[in-house]
Image: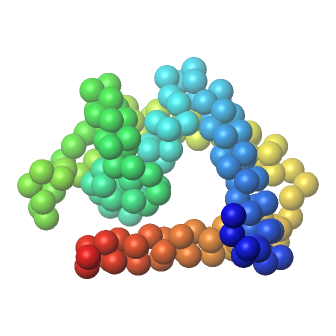
Amino acid sequence: MSDEQRTEEGEAVTALVLDVFRLNGRLQLAGDRLVSELGLTSARWQILGAIAYADRPETVAWHARTMGVHRQGVQRIVNELNSEGVVEFQPNPHHKRAHLVVLTRKGEKLYEAAIARQIPWVNELSEGLSSDDIATAQNVIGHLKTRLEEASLRQDQSSTQS
């Protein structure tokens, strides 16, 4: 076992990470319940949101990177959504095989129905929280996310140089 000890901040971040893991699990369960009657899961809803919020049509790989998940999982769900007529693939002028993914009209309506359920839920969830507290939490999470992305990029660069 290592003699190295966590700093006070390292202990705090460890506790925060564990809480974020637990929060993520609870958010997924709550999301599944919220949109199950629409034929969605949290994972499918998250992907619809990524597509809906993108500034322009993007590839599955881009969405996976943005979401911080594996491309294969996103591809599987996007293929299911495509077979159900919720999303469609469009030609990508920059790549022959990596098509762009867009919502169909059916997908737009499905996403809008999910958001209609999410609004009262999130408003109730946020009761009693101040905008400043929420901004502080976003700042800390954003900072940690950036550090993880930078570390991943350095690791990817070092593995390609070996």
**Residue drawn at the location 34% of the way across and 32% of the way down:** 81
Q: In which quadrant of the rendered image does the C terminus lie?
A: bottom left
Percent coordinates x, y for residue 118 in the rendering: 65, 40
Q: Where, by quadrant of the figure, is residue 131 drawn? A: bottom right
**Residue drawn at the location 81% of the way across and 51% of the way down:** 126
Q: Where, by quadrant of the figure, is residue 48 drawn? A: top left
Residue 148 in sight from this viewpoint = yes
Percent coordinates x, y for residue 54 in the rendering: 40, 59
Percent coordinates x, y for residue 17 in the rendering: 70, 59
Q: Compared with residue 49, is residue 32 higher up or lower down, i.e. above or below?
A: above
The type of colouring in the image is rainbow
Q: Is 130 displayed left or right of 96 in the figure?
A: right
Q: Is 130 displayed left or right of 57 in the figure?
A: right
**Residue drawn at the location 79% of the way across and 78% of the way down:** 7
Q: Where, by quadrant of the figure, is residue 33 drawn? A: top right
Please identify the residue farthest to the left as the structure is shown.
96
Q: Is 107 displayed left or right of 162 in the figure?
A: right
Residue 116 in sight from this viewpoint = no
**Residue drawn at the location 86% of the way across and 64% of the way down:** 130
**In the depicted view, which residue is nearer to us: 34 or 138?**
138
**In the depicted view, which residue is nearer to us: 88 or 15?**
15
**In the depicted view, which residue is nearer to us: 162 or 148?**
162
Percent coordinates x, y for residue 93 in the rendering: 12, 61
**Number of marks in the image?**
0
Q: In which quadrant of the rendered image does the N terminus lie?
A: bottom right
Q: Compared with residue 83, is residue 10 higher up or lower down, i.e. above or below?
A: below
Q: Is 3 displayed left or right of 87 in the figure?
A: right
Q: Compared with residue 37, is residue 156 higher up or lower down, i.e. above or below?
A: below
